[in-house]
Image: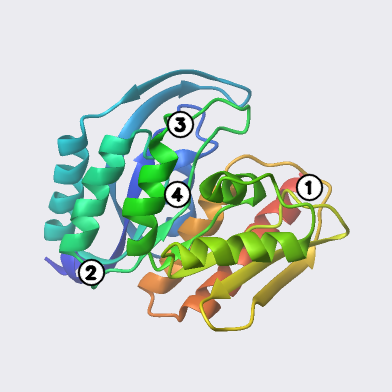
């Protein structure tokens, strides 16, 4: 079938019944860039745009089986990982990544919802850092997630954020995109870090608008461009531009 030969992004993450984040936002983003998706659902959530009311985790083996089936069925050119929920699901996803080292994986380390509900069990952060982060070609934490991943307080300025990012690189990460959405100032700057290279900054005006799912959107857009054989740096730049344009459109509606 011709469909099988088209590049796909395998999306691994949780559902969002409101449609504002999670797999719904991932599929929407990747499809708008012209890339097909396949899925491995890790959790089913009951939520609105304001709150998460319930979360049901899937069995780790079922998550891994979904990933393997998607990889067998399609030409998967990139993997985007979002909500993983438990240490056991992290281990299951990591096992599949180790079986498929040729496929680049982007990890958006989803630790909590916008409303503050924990989306990763306490104690699973260490498993994510140890077992999954080193297998991904890019990790995309915001300032809160970056601090939690290295066990520190949230960075108060760009220099401290870069230092924290380099701590995560030293722990085994291949590359990190530190998202600047939680920072202050007139510009929103995301910083791409590679070991032994100078930081690369992606800058845009900070818009006075709030929108759910921007973290999902950014990681998904990067994965879609990687699937289209763009370089990591180009994919990050295009992903940043995509999110800015979506925010800009949202601010005028």
Task: Find numbered disc 1 in the image and state the secondary structure of the residue it sits on.
Answer: helix
In the rendered image, the residue lying farthest to the top is 53
User: Which of pointers 4 and 1 lies earlier in the amino acid sequence?
Assistant: 4
Residue at which label 4 appears: 26
- Is label 1 in contact with label 3 (beta carbons under 8 Å)? no
Cα–Cα gap, marks 1 and 3: 23 Å
Number of the front mark, 1 or 3: 3
- Is label 4 in contact with label 1 (beta carbons under 8 Å)? no
- Is label 3 in contact with label 2 (beta carbons under 8 Å)? no
State the residue at coordinates (51%, 28%). 118
- Quick check: 53 left or right of 185? left
Number of the front mark, 3 or 2: 2
Residue at which label 1 appears: 251
- Is label 2 in contact with label 1 (beta carbons under 8 Å)? no
Number of the front mark, 2 or 4: 2
Residue at which label 2 appears: 101
Mark 2 packing: few (<14 Cα in 10 Å), some, or many (20+)? few
Residue at which label 3 appears: 16
Q: Where, by quadrant of the figure, is residue 223 drawn?
A: bottom left
Number of the front mark, 2 or 1: 2
């Amino acid at each position: 079938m011709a469909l099988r030969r088209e590049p796909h992004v395998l999306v691994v993450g949780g559902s969002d019944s409101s449609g504002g984040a999670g797999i719904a936002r991932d599929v929407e983003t990747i499809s708008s860039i012209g890339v097909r998706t396949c899925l491995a659902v890790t959790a089913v959530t009951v939520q609105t745009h304001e709150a998460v009311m319930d979360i049901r985790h899937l069995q780790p083996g079922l998550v891994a089986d979904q990933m393997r089936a998607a990889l067998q069925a399609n030409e998967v050119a990139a993997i985007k990982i979002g909500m993983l929920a438990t240490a056991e699901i992290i281990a299951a996803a990591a096992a599949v990544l180790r079986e498929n080292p040729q496929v680049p994986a982007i990890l958006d380390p989803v630790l909590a919802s916008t409303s503050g509900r924990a989306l990763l069990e306490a104690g699973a952060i260490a498993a994510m850092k140890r077992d999954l982060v080193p297998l991904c070609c890019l990790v995309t934490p915001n300032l809160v997630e970056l601090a939690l991943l290295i066990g520190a307080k949230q960075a108060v300025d760009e220099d401290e954020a870069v230092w924290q990012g380099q701590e995560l690189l030293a722990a085994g990460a291949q590359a990190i995109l530190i998202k600047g959405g939680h920072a202050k100032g007139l510009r929103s700057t995301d910083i791409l870090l590679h070991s032994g290279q100078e930081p690369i900054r992606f800058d845009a005006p900070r818009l006075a608008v709030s929108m759910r799912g921007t973290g999902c959107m950014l990681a998904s857009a990067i994965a879609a461009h990687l699937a289209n054989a763009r370089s990591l740096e180009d994919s990050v730049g295009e992903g940043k531009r995509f999110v800015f344009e979506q925010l800009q459109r949202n601010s005028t509606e």
